Structure formats: structure tokens, C-alpha cells
Amino acid sequence: MIRGMRFASFFEKVIEIPLSPHQHITYHHFFATNHEDIKNAESYNKFAYESAYRKEFTMKICQEVKQVYYNDPYFSIQTNGAELRLWFLTDDILRIRAGFDQTWDEASYSLVMTAWDSRTDSLFAGCRKRINVAPAALTDGPEIATIQGNRLKVFIHKNPFIIEVRDQDGQLIHKDIPDLAYRMDANGRRLHSSQIEETDSFYGFGEKTGSLNKAEKFMSMAPGDAMGYNPKETDSLYKHIPFYIRLNKCNGQAVGYFYHNTAECDFNMGREKRNYWHRYSTYRTDAGDIDLFLIAGPKITDILERYTDLTGKSAMLPKAALGYLGSSMYYPELEENCDDAILDFIDTTKEENIPVDGFQLSSGYCAIPTKEGVKRCSFTWNFQRFKDPKQWFHQMQQRGVLVSPNIKPGMLLVHPLLEEMKKKGMFIEASKDNPGMDHCAIGTWWGGPGLFVDFTHPTTRKHWKDYIKDNLLRYGCRSIWNDNCEYDSLTDKDAKVYFEGAGNTIGTIKSIMSNLMCQLSNEAIVEYDPDCRPFTVCRSGHAGIQRYAQVWAGDNLTCWDSLRYNIATILGMGLSGVANHGCDIGGFYGPSPEPELFVRWVQNGIFQPRFSIHSVNTDNTVTEPWMYSHQKKTIQEAIALRYQLSPLLYSLMARAHETGLPIMQSTFTLFQEDPATYDEDIDFFFGDHLLVANVVEKGQTTRTVYFPKAKNPKENFYDFYTRKMYRSGNQYDIEVTLDSIPLFVRSGAIIPMSENRLHNLMKEKTTSLHLLLAPDVDSQFTLYEDDGQSNEYLLGNYLKTTIHVQAAEKTRILFHHEGNYPTDVEQILLDVIHHEQAPFYIQLDQETLPHFLHRKKFEEASTGWYYSQSLKSVLIKYNNPKADHEVLISFEKFDMIGM
């Protein structure tokens, strides 16, 4: 990989200019005076690369500070090895950048919040926010320079050089390791080592296999096509997200580390140990600067909100994205009439009473005859398999099913559009040492050699959107599945990309291609149909992918280990800012899952933000909800539960869109004060108040569940079905059967559910809202509603109903509305867990509601309340006022005998 370059002008003047992944050269400064033909980015980029050769690096170690000064808007730290620059980006986010190349280019595809100009600003117009840096003051001393911000304080130790950061309480949140802190080795790799403790836990790192806590792990970040990966050991998978959270078991404090870099890298989280230095972790990247955004906590949720301030909040997807997404490679691979087969599959879901909202259309639809046989060629259609794509999309839409066709960024050499695309300059250029085909880099592709699209070129981006519109959207498609976009099969890492005119190598920038591909899918959909809310699906992704797409963990194995360890993979993505993630239910690759495994996978999968049963089984079977007749009812009930919980799920997606918080949450995210949760990676929370403790082991009849210890002694947990109470901070053995989905309601819960049964989220609405409450403590939840498919929500056509519970002897439930969307909810059922006693009376806006002692009479009435002795729960129903209102439940003691 080219990491440094030497250029000779016509006057034989030699200038050395290094390259890096997101800090790059503007060659004009060096060449414009020497050669009049080099007048723009494209021409000097070509000139530069033709003059390039490999350069030997020498080791550089930042060991001693020579000078510290303020150079608005950053602080400059001059060391013997390199200059470092430090920004107080906000009161809680520090940026520390070691510029071994000294180029300081700010072109970024990752950041949506900046305090500087960037060549990519126009590309992200509308989503990039420009801020002013936070105030800070420098005090320079002979041994230590101190920079004081509003909430963070930085100590710059001069000899040996390290940076130490403390919060407003004086708590140490970061400290470098002397000699090891900022280095560039003889191979041009850049390293940063930080002090850690034996009691530290580490989470995030994007999409990883194995356990959730990565203490003492070594991980690479080099995304690839990992079909059939080992769910416990394979590394890397498909994502490149160099972000993690460090959480200390002793003090419960957390801090976030985001290394702003697109090059391949690795993380050593204390696996290495040396007697000469304090325990440490090391980040090592193949190229680019050490560009660290240090994000203060101490709460994990605060770190996630701040990290997603930097890289973007989750996309607001249509409701269909949260339904059951049917898929299989089987149907599009049939020799003919694939369209009819898929329609029959959708009709069968209706017959089997299985809800469905989407279909992920694998690439068989574009597998067409070529001179080398049938090959997959994006933007084409096999009309023997799909006779009339426009009519087929229409029929799927009538059934309430949103189709996501698969497209890929590689084009085979036999692709019918290849020459046309080459003339448009859409492909990555070959390096000098690997001439390729007509100056285009050739790589291994699905079906033979191929060329790869360069999304870092503005004109290529326009052409790509045109292909989407002409070959997909005009047929009625309104969703795109971007696949195989890791670019790992292009083995010539020195192949050239445009990089907005500055030039770079694919080896240092390939991780952002999937993000750009997803951005273009969304733009194409909105440009073609402005009222349509785009839904993009993607397998790969770099930091910030959450703002574009729903993603999944690729081609998992059909085994029990995948079921178990995929949970930690999804939780880790949530702790990396990616809330909308999932894994193929039942497994993608391998023999068909046995009946028990499939049941358990569906029971777990219904809580994944992305719920898709997708397979290419190696035993010629197809994984479908009805594949085991004797388990159909159990599968049906599990999927029905997901649809029942859809008001909660949709509201959590809206929350992720606003805050960046996960949908599936690790237990320690909510119980950070309880170190017993720090290694838990099977049990998780769906939202903030529903603990999911699914069965993931074969033949299990007893499930041991630990209920996290809350700071508030009033907090407990209740069985979702029976309302049996479990004490916080205790462990219980719970009997389970194959039908069991162990769920527990946390004190303070406000869980919105659909009382009317739903089979499709696009065509059907929740008209009867069931609110499950556990008012042991005060709590609040925002129920979100809109039409679920248009962009009208951007114009205020949404409804946020903030439900505030004030827990007391007189419990108050307050409803406050914001927005213009007319709710579809006609009736509300409050299901209020209260073990101690039945209410004295209940009022709706100060009007007393009728009390029923007979359950049947309560069910026949439109308004009133009933106390369930078996559930120890108060059931209250009334017609939705569709306005702000209050429900008062009096649990005052009533002395009937005394009267």
C-alpha cells in the first residue's frame, strides 16, 4: 500500500508528500508553478500517481514536547516525533490528532458534526452540522501544560510525553503510555497506546463475534465476505467501526474512543502485557493519522448520544422495515417464474396466519445469460424468471409487501453495461504495478473477474443513481439492498480512487464505499419519489452507516453457537451507534436448523431490530416459518408477539433516530452501577423496561436469570405473562418449555402494545392501544406515531405522546401530545401492575370511571376498570380522548368497616 510518495517536477526538484486515509494531499500547491498543464484535481491526481513509488519509512516516536501553544481553534503540541493538535470540540468531546504526515486534510465521510471546513461538506449538505469549538484555557508550565475546559481538563506531560485527561470531578478518564503513546513504525503503521486497568471492560468495535466484553482480546478491522463464519472466533466480519467504550468495574465510569480513520486497523485490548509499562491497550492502523475523538461519559448512554452526534443518528425507516422480512436465495434462483413463486410464498404466509411486510430479493433476479453462462449482473433483469417486473412490484405492493432488490458494486467483465460504465469513468483505476483492463483495476468477483465502482467520484455517484432509477425504481421498487460491498476481493490495495479530486488508494478508503452506496440509494429513491421514505439494507458499513441503512451480520451458520453469539454481535453494534441491526433468523449457511433450534431462533429473533428469515441451506432445504408442521403454531405465536410489540419497537426506532440509543440494549447499559451485568451477553433489554432472557441452549428445561440490581430499592421485575415478582439483584431458576419466551417487566415500565392483532404494519394500524405499566417508580416514555411510509413526518406530521407516570398512593398517568398526525388509536387499555391492593377509585380527567367486579361485564363495556386478582393488575379502558389527559388511580386505603 502506498503510504508515502515522491514526485519529480520537470526541473528534477524532489518533494516528498505522504498519503493517509482521510488526510490527503492537495498536489496543486507543489506542482502548479512547475507544470502549466496541471490545473485541476483530476489532472494532478493522475500526474502524481504516475510518478509514485514506494518509500521506506523510519520509526517515529513522540517522546518529548518541545512547545505547546494555542492556534485558534486548536492547541498545537510540538513533539520530537510529530505535531499533535487538540480540540475541545464540545465540553465532553476531545479531539486528539497526531499528524505524522503533516497534511491535516479534513475530508471526512464519517463525521456529521465538525468545527472546520471539509472538501466533503457539499456531499453531506443537509446532514452535516457546523459548530464552534468549546472554550478552553492553556496554562504552560516547565513540566506540564494544562488545558482547562468547562468539564474536561487535559494535562500534557512534556518528558516523557503523554496526555492525561480528567473530568470535572478529577476522575481520570484517559492516560497515554510513555514511549508507546503516539508512534509510526518502519512499515508506516501508526499506533496509539492507552492506560487500562485489569478491572476494565471493553464494548463496541462494530460487528464482532464472540463474547460482548472484549477485555484481553485482539481484533482486526478488515471487513470481508465471511460466509459461514464461526460465530465465536471469526474476525473480521463485514463492518469497519473503530469505536469502543471502556467501562471500569470498580467505579462504574465509562469513556468512549472513536478513531476517525478509514484504513484497516487492529485493537489489542490488554492481550499484550509488558513489564516495563503499566497495563495498556493499543490501536494500530495501516495508514493515516491517529485521530482520536475521546468522548466523556460517565454514563454509557451519554457516550452513545455524543458519538452519534459525531457520526449520525439512526435512519428513520418505514414501518415495513420492522416487520417480518421474508427472503430466501431459493426463489430467485428458479429457472423460470420466480415472480409467481414469490407471490405464492407471500400468499402462503397469509394462509398460515404469519404476518409479513417485506421481501429481500436476492440477486438471482439479475442473473442473465452471457457468453460465459448465466451471471449476476446488477441493473439487469432475467425476464424468464420475472416476466413483468413492474406488474410484479405492483402485486407485491397490493399485498402490503415492500421488496428490496439486491445490487452489488462489482461488475463482471461480461456485464452488458461494462463498456458503457467504463466510458463514464465509473470504475476504480489500476495501480501502476497492476495495469488492469483499460486502466481499470480488476479483482475477483462473484462469477469471475470484475471491475469495481468508485463512489468517491461525484459524476460516478450521479450515474449510479441514474442506473437505480432506470432499472429498479421505474418498475415500482422503493427499497434497495446493497450487498457484497466490502471491496475485499480487490486485492490490489494500491488501486486508485478519486477521493473528491485529491486521490487515494482503495486500501485506505474502501471501508466508506458501502456508506456512500447506501447514501446514493436513499437519494435516488427520494429524488425519484419525494414522498417515499427510503429503506436501504446493507451488509457492510463504516462508522456512520446507521444514518443510512438497516444492516445485518451477513452469512451466519445454521448452528446453536450462532444463535447464542449473534446476540452479543447485535448488542455490540448497538454499543457502536448502530441501533437497527440483526442476524439471519435460522442461520443463512449450512444444513437446515433442527426444529428446536429454529423455534428458539425465531423466539429470540422477534426482538432483533431487523427480523428476516433468510437462507441458502446446504442440504437443498429452504428455511421458512412453516417448515416444521408440528412447530407452526409456536412460530406463529412468536411472530405475532413481535407485531403486538410493534408500537414499542417503532417508538424505539424513533428514539434511536433522535438520540442514537440502541433498541436492543445490554443489561449494563441500563444498570451501569451493577458490575454483575458487565459480562452478560445473552440476556438483554428490548427498550428500557422489557428484559428478554431467551433460551439459547439445546434441551434446556430450566433457565437461570439474573435480575440486575437497581439503585432504587423500589425497583423489581415481573413476569410478562403471570406478573409474578422477582427481586432486583437476585438470581432465579425458571422452568421453561419449547413454547417459552421468558420476558420480564422492569419497575417503571411503560410498554405500548397493539391490542388488536396485526398482520401487516403498512396496511394495518393499531386501533386499540394496550399500555403495560409497572408504577413502582416514576417513569416516562414517548409513544411515536406517523403514517409509517412517507416523509410527511419531516413536516411535523407525526404524533409524540409523552406518557409520564407519577408513582404514589395516588398514581397519576399523564398524556401529553405533540405533532399534527391524527392518531389511529380509538381505545386505550391500561394494564397497571399493582400487587399490594386494588384501587379505591379511578378517574379520567377528574371523572370517576365505573368499577366492574365481573370480568365479562368489564370486557363488554367501553369504559371502566377491573382488578385482576390472578394477575394482580388494574385493567382500565376508555375511549381515546385524542388530546392531553390524565388518569388518576387512587390506592388509598378505604376503611369500609369503619364507615
Image: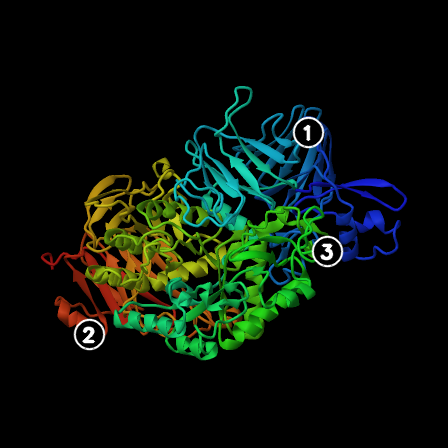
Circle 1 Cα neighbour tier, 10 Å, few/some/many (<14 / 14–19 / ≥20): few
Q: Which residue is mark 2?
A: 861
What colour scheme was applied to this rendering of the protein? rainbow
Residue at the location (41% across, 65% down)? 333
| Residue toward you, 99 or 738 | 738
State which quadrant residue 17 falls in.
top right
Give amino acid for label 2: Ala
State which quadrant residue 411 falls in.
bottom right
Mark 2 element type: loop
Q: Which mark is residue 501?
A: 3
Q: Is residue 462 visible?
A: no
Q: Is 161 situated above or below 247? A: above
Give amino acid for label 3: Gly
Q: CA distance from mark 2 to mark 3?
A: 70 Å
Which residue ends up furthest to the left in the rendered image?
897
Q: Which residue is mark 1?
A: 59
State which quadrant residue 43 falls in.
bottom right
